Structure formats: structure tokens, C-alpha cells
Amino acid sequence: MIPGPKRPEAPTEEAVQDPSVARPPYLYPDYRATRLRAPRRPLVVLPERLLDPGGPVFGELTPHQLEADLTRQHKGEPLGQRIIVAGTLRDGSGRPIRGQLIEIWQANAAGRYAHQGDQHPAPLDPNFTGTGRLLTDSEGRYRFVTIRPGAYPWQNNPNAWRPAHIHFSVFGTAFDQRLVTQMYFPGDPLMATDPISSAIEPRARRRMVSDLDLGLTVEQWALGYRFDIVVEGSAATPFEEVGRA
Amino acid sequence: MSGAGNTPSQTAGPYIAMGFSWPGRERLLDPGEPGALELEGQVLDGAGQPVPDAAVEIWQADAGGAFPGPGPARWPGFGRCLTDEEGHFRFTTVKPGRLAAPGGVLQAPHIEVQVFGRGLLRQLFTRIYFADEEEANAQDPALAAIPDRDARATLLAQPTATGYHFDIVLQGERETVFFAR
Ligand SMILES: [Fe+2]
């Protein structure tokens, strides 16, 4: 019998000081790839006044560069369970982030990415690429149509499986608010042995788990999952205040 | 939703290129335009090996020290480049002008940098300065905040025939200075 993976270590004290601002440590040995990629020297703290140089906005993106429906990018429909993933993008003080870019990428229903590096022997789906992007609306809301991704094995440790997830990359108002994360599905037992989600303090981990939301479903067509995203901090400095020399 | 707490960061994973692919976004201006230069380098891990599954993002002022304002902006300020199999990245950009920080201190020309990738549970934050700006660098408040004087050199891009070279060393002897955010 192949042994199951052991439960990852809880994050260190340092990483759990403030559960309202939850961050993973850079070095988290249970996730092996951090061992040679985490800086070992202390991070340098900058004076507060140097911190907010604004950030990019992407209003110039044209609709054809944006793709919020991942089930309509090919001739046929992808296999798998059609779902709607929607929510609101906000900053740390609860303000919606309007007209800002959200990018997602994910495996297909069989747990296989349309990426040449993915050697998992599960079928590719000719009707599914698994990438999408959009701009949030005037109230910070977003909505993707996709299919539920499958769980997939990886090489991190013996018999390791990632819980089903969708990768998210979002922009805040300031560049410092950039966030890359993963959205998980409610009740997934694979999270307990997953070293990537386990790098987050347990009370904060649930903020990466979407909620099944019947209000988001389209009857007779697709289930809906709500995933609200909160980036750190709030936009303190409007552009006009950024000085020039 | 105030007080609800932030959404924690997770790694972009090995297939970062799927989500981050954005052809042309490594060019902040046309290579033929005045001031255009090539800013290139390599992302290396703690064993000195290239990191092929990462992305480098930059945010910077234009040559006059201005960030893009609201409305249609000619200067995008933002660039993104995925690393190739050799860990290389390459931007076409300009050397930014000096920026005033609140309090009247002038900052040396610099570029804000974030690094994403497999093995990075959260992005890394650093800054690119320019080795040929000695006088401005000597007065820069962010460089001055780095306690280890020798380590400041890890943030200096070196002039090349076509622009500047800047390696991002995630770990080890030549480890780049990263900032807390
Ligand atoms: Fe993934």
C-alpha cells in the first residue's frame, strides 16, 4: 500500500502573529520548492513614506483581450461540470477595486493543465485551455464561467495530490497590493494534506475556500461558487500626490 | 467587509506561464524611441540554478519621473516578463527619472520589482537601481535603509552595450536584497 502523505507542519509563530493579515512564510520546507527559492537573509523594512508609488491600471484592454468564459474558447464545449465563479475584489478597508485586472488559470476536469510541462497522464481536452481574464466592474465585481478543475498528483512528496483549485492573479490600486492566490472548493478533504494551502495559518486558510452560492447558479445550467477577494492595505496615495523631480 | 481579513497569497505554481502570458508586455516602449534601453538578467535559485518558471513584474516612472496618471496613458509604467528556460528575462524600458518622496527627499532612479513563481508562496519585492548613478544612489533613502552596506550592491544594475544587466538571486552568497511588504 502506498502511504498517504503526512500532514504538513503548522506555520511558524512569526507567520501567525496577525491572523487578519495572513501571509505564508517564504520558507516552508513541507513545500519542497521553497527550500532553494526562499531568501535566507532578513527582509529589509523600508520607511513607510516610500511605500506607495501607485500602480498600473488596464482600462485600455479591449474586449477580445479579455475572456471571462472559459467554456467558449473552442469549437466545442469542454468536458466537466460547468460552474460560475464570481465575487468582489476589495482592498483591506473594504473598498471595491474597480476596473482592475483579474487573471485565472486552471487544470481541466481530469486534472491536467494545457501546459507542455504537465506530464500527468490524464487526458487533455481539446475544448479547454483553462485561462481567462477580465476587468472588475464599477463595483469591483467579477464573474467567470468555467468548468470545475480536477485534483492532480504532483512530485512534492510521496502520493501527493493537490486539492482542486483555480489560480488567481489580481491587481489592487497600488502595485504593492498585487496578489496571486488559489481558490479552493468547499469541503475538499485534500486540503488537510496539501503543503501549499497549509502554509497559511488555519483560521485564514478558509478565506481561500469558495462558497457554494445557489444565488449565483443558473438554473438547469451551472452551479455557482462565490469567491470574494481582499487584497492587503488600502490605497492611500492618489496619483496626484506622487511627486516628481 | 472591513475586518474580514485578507485573502492569503499562494504560489503561482509551475504553470505560471498559462496565467501570466501577455505577449509584448515586456516592452514599455518601442525599442527605437529615445531613451529606450534593454534591461535584462537572470533569476537564480540557492543552488545557482536558473529559475525557468517565474515571472518578473516591474513598475516605474518614465524618464521625467512621472507615473501614468488617469486617462489614456502613453507611458504604461508596468511591465511583465516570464523567465525562459535559462531563467532569463528582458524588458525594453527607460531609466526612470528621480522621484521625490514625501518629506522632500529625492530618491535615486529606480524600478519597483516583484517576482512570482513556483516555490514562492508569496511574491518577492525588490528594487532595481543603476550602478552609474553613484551620486543619486548615495542619497537614496531606500538604499540607506539596507543595514548591510555590501548587500546594497545587489540592487545595482550594471551598464551593458544595450542597457543594463540585473540578476535576481533568490538565495545564497549573492542573494538579492528583498524588501518586507
Ligand atoms: Fe495548480
Image (cartoon, helix red, strand yellow):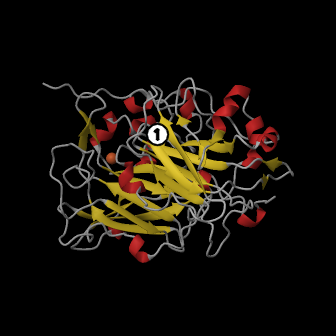
Q: Position of residue A57 (x, y in %)?
A: 57, 66
Closer-to-camera residue (A227/B95):
B95
Residue located farthest toward the left when viewing the structure as drawn: A1
Residue located farthest toward the front when viewing the structure as drawn: B161
Image quarter hosting the N terminus of chain A:
top left
Give the amino acid type for the residue marked by disc 1 in the picture. Leu
Image mark count: 1
Callout 1: few (<14), some (14-19), or many (20+) C-alpha neighbours within 10 Å? Answer: many
In this rendering, position of residue A220 left or right of residue A239: left
Q: Which residue is mark 1?
A: B121
Q: Is residue A12 visible?
A: yes
- Residue beneath the point at 23% across and 72% down: A221
Q: Is residue A231 visible?
A: no
In this rendering, position of residue B2 left or right of residue A219: right
Residue located farthest toward the right when viewing the structure as drawn: B104
Q: Position of residue A95 (x, y in %)?
A: 60, 63
- Residue beneath the point at 50% across and 55% down: B80
Closer-to-camera residue (B154/A107):
B154
Image quarter hosting the C terminus of chain A:
bottom right
